[in-house]
Image (tube, rainbow, N blue to C red):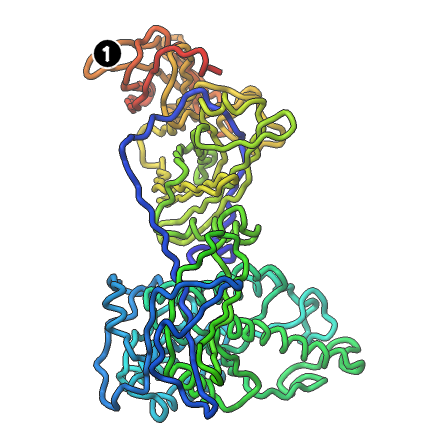
Amino acid sequence: MSFSRHRLASKILATLLGLALLCSSLPAQQQGDYVFRVESELVLVNVTVKDRNGSFVRGLKPEEFTILEDNKPQKVVSFDVENIDAVATQDVAQTKPLTGAAPQAENPAATSAADSANQFKDRRLIVLFFDLSAMEPDEIDRAITSAEHYVDTQMAPADLVSIVSLGSSLLVNQDFTSDHELLKKQLQAFGEGTGQGYEEGTTGTTEGTPDTGQPFTADDTEYNIFNTDRRLEALRSVAEKLAHVQQKKSLIYFSSGMDRTGIENQSELRAATNAAVRANLAIYTMDLRGLQALVAGGEAQNASLRGTSAYSGQSMINALNSNFTTQETLVTLASDTGGRAFLDSNDFSQVFKGVQQDTSTYYLLGYHSTNPARDGRYRRIVVKVNIPGVKVDYRRGYYAPADYQHSTKEDKELQLQEELASELPATDLPLYLGLAYFRMETNKFFIPVSLVVPGSEIPFTRSSDRDKATLDVIGAVFDSEQHPISRIRDTVKLAVDTSSEVRKKNVQYDTGLSLPPGKYHLKFVVRENQTGRMGSFETDLNVPDLKSQPLKMSSIILASQLQPEKKGTTPNPLIRDGEEIVPNVTHVFSANQHLRLYYEVYDPGRANAPPASEGGQAKPGIHLLTNVAFFRGKSKVFESSVVELTELNARDRKAGVFQLDLPLSPLKPGFYTCQVNVIDDAAGQFLFPRLALLIRPDNSSSAQ
């Protein structure tokens, strides 16, 4: 999982500072770029046909099969016979690696569909998935022993086995291979220290829990939800990376149960099963706890139970319910993907026999559904063979893809999380990001964040007498080690009298962060909730340690608008005298506007020294000078008057604050370089930072 709410290193202030409709439009995107998108979703169905004696019926042709989806006939476009038993008992050469089965896999190589078909033809593909995050050391030993026994005595020449594990991260420990020694070497590498299991119990009350002397029982519901989501996401990740292989794949999931908390995990469970079905991956679940003897008063190694539940029979009911809950998800994963669940048994070799029997010989049929609707509904599949007296086994259905309008609330939230974790940017919705930094304390900086979306890209719907739209915003901050340290999640509601005016402007979302000096990476995702289009923007941020700088200066904010301060707003240097400066991210202004500049200088020369007397005249403690010059090319075309500051106007932060207001009407439209001149006369230091800006011709229709 790329981002976890349970791995936050620290809480960072995230305050909504406002939503502004900016009068300047974003630069027009280049025209003439053509994007071709082709979506082809092949539905694969594994079919086993057996006669009255239970023998596989061979030699069938595509025309002898009839496929119905929701009672509508489908055309078979691909047909293959996988005959695992036909592989001779000889050493099978080690195959290509399982490319990209997990984010941690090294040197991923693209594998074409043709290469995969030849590589895995007439092979039994088995993935051994060890969920080390939830197994105790003795359960890991059972899983390893059963897997080693399979490799030594049951593994057929046609079997290609891969080993995947989930501990602190998802790892491909061994790529697909038929080499017994490689597999046993990796299995033996799983030691007793690998287990990270935990005891799940009743939450929120001490009744019926072991009396260990603790005054309360911690409520671990949120932890259980997170842990289950993490395991389901790992299964989904493996399924998606195996989707390019058309042959049937079998994943044996070794675990000690999976606790699912109501509907909280429903979206992730459905996503995992759908990914497995689309990838033609059957999940076989094995509960390594084996046949359990539940004791009413608790096991001998546990403390006595609190309360009266041990005497009323309630503790026994709770134990049975807990055991059933952890096994229910295993059964669901298996049944919904065409596999089987192996529970309450100490014979752990049964799962390997079941996989080999189910994948020995089968027909692989593929078709393109005639139903184009992306409604996410369950579609029933019926396969018939025009031969009387045969038994046909196949997958009974699948869930159709769902577009944004047909997605559930949980699916939409999951979509945002996935896009935030994606390595590829989303570009359907144009998104622009602006950042700055201002010192609040010695090691604490306020980071204003501005996200801008062109108003023309936001579809509005008419409701009552107003046009309305909503935007979902999600973001994450990562430190220099790529560890997530904070997240932002918000929904912005827009309501305007007429959307035609908004389409000529930009919609800006402003928020803020509090960070110490350091190097960070930020990523934000914005989605408009009419069609579900998303845009992402990520960038690096270096918050400097100003202690070593001779002239300590903040970022420079360019703006054209002010808005009233909102009640309850967290301290923000951009708010002064009851008004808030709205940063202009694009640096595009109209000639009829005023350019407002905001910046700060910290600890200027003699800021902490009392005024001294020289020649009978008082010498000021500080003396800051600043003005702004505009250049076109190398020619200076305008320079503002000099502003002096002889005392700190933000004493609590030891800062000298400058707010300049310059009319742009004297400047001709075009591109300019804006140079801000800052001189600390008392300390003999100076800075001349530069920024680019564009002045457009006066357009009163776009002015606010």
Q: Is residue 141 visible?
A: no
On the picture, is 337 further left or further right than 466?
A: left
Of 233 and 595, the residue lying toward us: 233
The residue depicted at 35 percent of the width and 29 percent of the height is 552
- Where does label 1 land, which residue? 636
On the picture, is 250 further left or further right than 88?
A: right
Mark 1 packing: few (<14 Cα in 10 Å), some, or many (20+)?
some
Q: Position of residue 422 (x, y in %)?
A: 38, 52
Judged from this view, the residue extending furthest toward the left is 634
The residue depicted at 41 percent of the width and 21 percent of the height is 24
Q: Position of residue 342 (x, y in %)?
A: 52, 83
Find residue 361 and report its image quarter.
Answer: bottom left
The residue depicted at 28 percent of the width and 17 percent of the height is 672
Q: Position of residue 318 (x, y in %)?
A: 70, 76
Q: How many marks?
A: 1
Quarter occupied by the N terminus: bottom left
Q: Is residue 144 visible?
A: yes
Q: Secondary structure at mark 1?
A: strand
Q: Tell me if residue 158 comes above or below residue 670 in the rendering.
A: below
The residue depicted at 43 percent of the width and 40 percent of the height is 443
Q: Amino acid at mark 1?
A: Lys
Q: Position of residue 603 (x, y in %)?
A: 40, 28
Of 567 and 236, the residue lying toward us: 236
Of 515 and 272, the residue lying toward us: 272
Q: Tell me if residue 422 comes above or below residue 509 in the rendering.
A: below
